Amino acid sequence: MKPTDTLKHEHKIVLAVLDGAEREAQHIKATGNVDTEKVAKMLDFFRTFVDKCHHSKEERRLFPKLQERGMPGDAGPIAVMLHEHTLGRDEVKSIADALKRFQEGDAAAAKDVAQHLLSYAELLRNHIDKEDSVLFHFADQILTDSDQEELTTAFDEIEASEIGEGVHEEYHRFAHELNKR
């Protein structure tokens, strides 16, 4: 499996959790009630699986390798992806801040939790589409076989060091559970 295939597979897991986040946001909007445990698990997924694992693979390994092969990092697809990673981190922080306010008794913060869940989901869906249809297509064209092998090994190392053994599978189960409900 190519490194881009690994990232595309991870995108499917992210999209499944985003489906759950959108359903939760609609429930919040309809009822004014937040399932704080579920949203906290989503935040953990966004911070750990999406950012520490998936985005680390891209930012620390894939993007620099693409730059070595001639793709500019300060403009074009890489610059857009990096900017969107930052926007995503900001949305996750906004979800967490709104959740904390709700947990502290601010019922009006439920609306903010819902809105930031929806904003994050929209951002990531568009981001994933760009990576899958544009960036990864370019990557597969310019990366050598040696690059592919190096990235596969590096991705495994990032997964082991950033989230640990078996945690990836736990997030897969979480995504599946969200979509059984």
Image: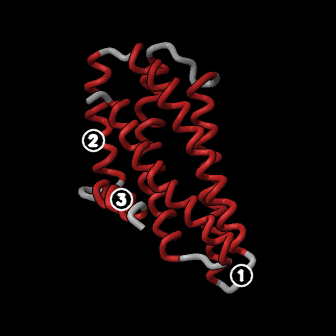
Q: Who's the residue at 58% across and 25% down the image?
A: 77
Q: Secondary structure at mark 1?
A: loop
Q: Nearer the viewer, mark 2 or mark 1?
A: 1
Badge number at residue 136? none
Report whether 130 appears left or right of 164: right
Q: Nearer the viewer, mark 3 or mark 2?
A: 3
Label 1 environment density (alpha carbons within 10 Å; few <14, some 14–19, many ≥20): some
- Please, is residue 171 above or below residue 10 in the view? below
Q: Residues within 10 Å of mark 2 (few under 14, many from 20)?
A: few
Of badges 1 and 3, the one in the foreground is 3
Q: Which mark is residue 107?
A: 1
Q: Quadrant of the N terminus?
A: top left
Give SS at disc 2.
helix
Amino acid type, mark 2: Asp
- Residue 94 is situated, as x and y percent measured from the top left of the image, at 66, 62
**124 or 90: which is nearer to us?**
124
Q: Residue 174, position in %: x, y? A: 37, 62
The C terminus, quarter of image: bottom left
Query: Residue 156, which numbered label?
Result: 2
Disc 3 crowd, CA 10 A, few/some/many (<14, 14-19, 20+) = some
Instruction: Please give the residue where the numbered disc 3 appears in the rendered image.
Output: 176
Looking at the image, residue 113 lies above or below residue 101: above
Residue at position x 52%, y 23% from top?
134
